[in-house]
Image (cartoon, grey):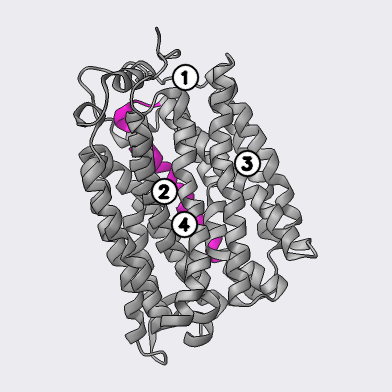
Amino acid sequence: MTADTPPVDRGSRLRWVICGLLFFSIVVNYLHRLTISILKPELSRELGWSETDYGMIAAAQSFSYAFGYLFGGRIIDRIGPKRGLPIFVLLWTLAAIAHGFCRYLDVSATFSYPWFQKTESGLAVATLVIPMTVAGFVMARIALGLTQGANFPAAIKVVAEWFPVKERALATGWFNTGSNVGAVLCPLAVPVLFKVVGWEWTFYLTGVVGLLWLVAWKALYDEPEQHRKISASELAYIRAGQPAVEETPQRVPWLKLLSYRSVWAYVIASILAGPAWGFYQSFLPDFLNKRFHLNLGATGFWTAVFFALAAAGGVAGGWLSGKFMNQGWTLNKARKLTLLACAIAVVPIYFAPFASEVWMAVIIIGLAGSAHQGWSANLFSVVSDTMPKEAISSVVGLGGFVAYFTGGFVNGFTGLILQKTGSYVWVFAYFSMMYLLSLALLQLLVPRIQREKA
């Protein structure tokens, strides 16, 4: 018996219950994150926002989420997901509810601060004036981003503790479908809530869902060795299918992480391809609304269809790499060929702005979104395949930081592009090739996926 050939589990399936908890944490995360993108047309009309105003709000979310990933991952490595994850969920739930309090800001009030402006004689100090409601939403998005960033690093760490290597990508794919389920529920529920109770109560009501998850986590979660309901056979199955670890775990300093080639590969891939998902969250409803002149209900419906299509990708991508390994393929070959299939499936997104019918555009973008989820499931698993257990959340946090920090610029530039051209063509063209480039660089830096040596 080896780590590559774990025994057949004939005991309980508690690890999949734990995966379900992670799934629902992602559902809540995305419900809170996407509500504003669905309400964008109505908020813009009611509060008088320009495209650059919303671009600023979206950029604030991305930048803060980047830092939330970075520091959240480190905190999770230090205190563990059992204590850390529910703390972060509680904090982001409060931040989600806080969006509704922007109702009490004066729509006509403005907020000013110094800014540098290019003139014929060089740079000069100017005053940037933004609406107070924009400033309020920026603060709420910053609080949400800083606290939500720990979710994925914690989830990847839980998967590394609860699943053997062959099941990690599948488990990651399953819990990551929570992003799609949340993204499907959000555009279906939010327009109804908005119509019945208005936008501020929409934020209040979607916000409190996080409190229900906290109750479930407290009742059901514990670490494998301490869980009162795990069977001896399932614990043996999990441990037999994992790489050997040191008896005395050592914390890995941040700077030491940069000595690993696999960390650089993961970080570069996160910079190039990672911002795509943030773009879908912040701008897909707006793209559909502008390109096909949809009302709020139709925009919500087609956005939900996109995320429903994308949901299959994470599970399929995780299943495919596991299937390849079960057929005797090496870990390296199984992961990379699955990543290649996902990268190729993204390329047609270039044609989405030229689609003549909304369903055609949604299918094209849905294929890319599905491929992104499959890509993410395997790329996250590469981290747990190559890194010491004590560094997994830190590395995932570092990758998330650079992805969403880059995404902040992408969101900001997207707002500027729309303000000047009204077209999404260049943005879709950019993302169409980033996955193939990321995979090429991954192959260059990590010719063989295996556990890194300290």
- Looking at the image, do the residues carrying marks 2 and 1 touch, with CB atoms under 8 Å apart? no
Q: Residues within 10 Å of mark 2 (few under 14, many from 20)?
A: many
What mark, if any, has residue 435 been given in the picture? 3
In space, the residues marked 1 and 4 are separated at their CA atoms by 34 Å
x 23%, y 41%: residue: 82
Q: Is residue 171 magenta?
A: no
Element at label 1: loop
Mark 3 burial class by Cα count in 10 Å: few <14, some 14-19, many 20+: many
Q: Position of residue 94 (x, y in %)?
A: 27, 66
Three-letter amino acid code at the position of disc 4 = Gly
Residue 397 versus residue 229 in the image, above or below: below
Quadrant location of the C terminus in the rendered image: top left
Amino acid type for the residue under numbered disc 2: Phe
Q: Earlier in the sequence, mark 3 or mark 2?
A: 2
Residue position for label 1: 450
- As measured in the structure, the alpha-carbon distance from the residue carrying label 2 to the one carrying label 1 is 24 Å
Label whose residue precedes the other's in the sequence (4 or 2): 4
- In 3D space, how far apart are the residues under numbered discs 3 and 4 (Cα atoms)? 24 Å
> Are discs 3 and 4 less than 8 Å apart at CB?
no
| Residue at the image point whose x is 31% and y is 66% from the top | 208
- Circle 1: residue type: Gln
Q: Earlier in the sequence, mark 1 or mark 4?
A: 4
> Which marked residue is nearer to the observer: mark 1 or mark 4?
4
Element carrying mark 4: helix
Q: Which residues are magenta?
A: 387-412
Residue at 48% in and 30% down:
382
What's the distance in space between the residues labelled 4 and 2, CA to CA? Answer: 22 Å
Checking the image for residue 182, the label placed there is 4
